[in-house]
Amino acid sequence: RGQAEQEQDLISEVSDAATSRRRELLDLAQADADAYAAVVAARRLPRDGEPAGERSQRIGAATRQATLVPLRTAEAAAAVLELSARIAPVGNRNAVSDVGVAAQLASASVRAAVLNVRINLPGLPADDGVRRDAAARAEELWGSVVRREADVVALVTRRMATTT
């Protein structure tokens, strides 16, 4: 198999993966809206309702979900960034700027989702494993996408320079 055929296979594979991630991210956007609505609804429960502690338990469960959903969103967006990294070296040089845009949008999506994770963390008990694990994973994602985005944009910039 020649290089052109291998590149076309990679392009097809990345295209299929990107389509799947787009669906996943759209579902996560709805899940995020639902999680936020659940937090709002739980906070609106009467403070002195029966049974005792129900409000607090519902707020905790809703906040946990409102933390986990954007964390999953950040992970899915990071996967999109990886797809852009895979496709950046190949394909039509005249369309490589689109790869750079995709990388920047994916990176911004990761950072936005991490901000949503961070805002919800204080609402979880200090000893909650989700709080600890989500905080660590969110910071890991933030750092890795900043570096990865820079790498992809640098490659895209180099490829764009060769088109003129």
Image (cartoon, rainbow, N blue to C red):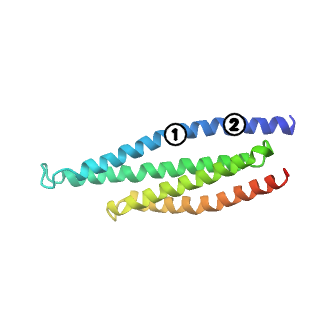
Dot 2 or dot 1: first in sequence order is 2
Looking at the picture, tell me which residue is in the foreground, 94 or 29.
94
- Outermost residue on the right side: it is 2
Q: Is residue 112 rendered to the left or right of residue 80? A: left
Total marks shown come to 2
Give the secondary structure at mark 2. helix
Q: Residue at x 43, y 56 (%)?
A: 116
Q: Residue at x 66, y 46 (%)?
A: 83
Give the secondary structure at mark 1. helix
Q: Tell me the amino acid under the disc marked 2.
A: Glu
Looking at the picture, tell me which residue is in the foreground, 78 or 1.
78
Residue 92, horizontal then vertical, whole percent: 79, 42
Residue 127, horizontal then vertical, whole percent: 34, 64
Residue 50, horizontal then vertical, whole percent: 12, 49
Q: Residues within 10 Å of mark 2 (few under 14, many from 20)?
A: few
Q: Tell me the amino acid under the disc marked 1.
A: Glu
* Residue on which the image places disc 2: 13
Residue 138, horizontal then vertical, whole percent: 49, 59
* Residue on which the image places disc 1: 24
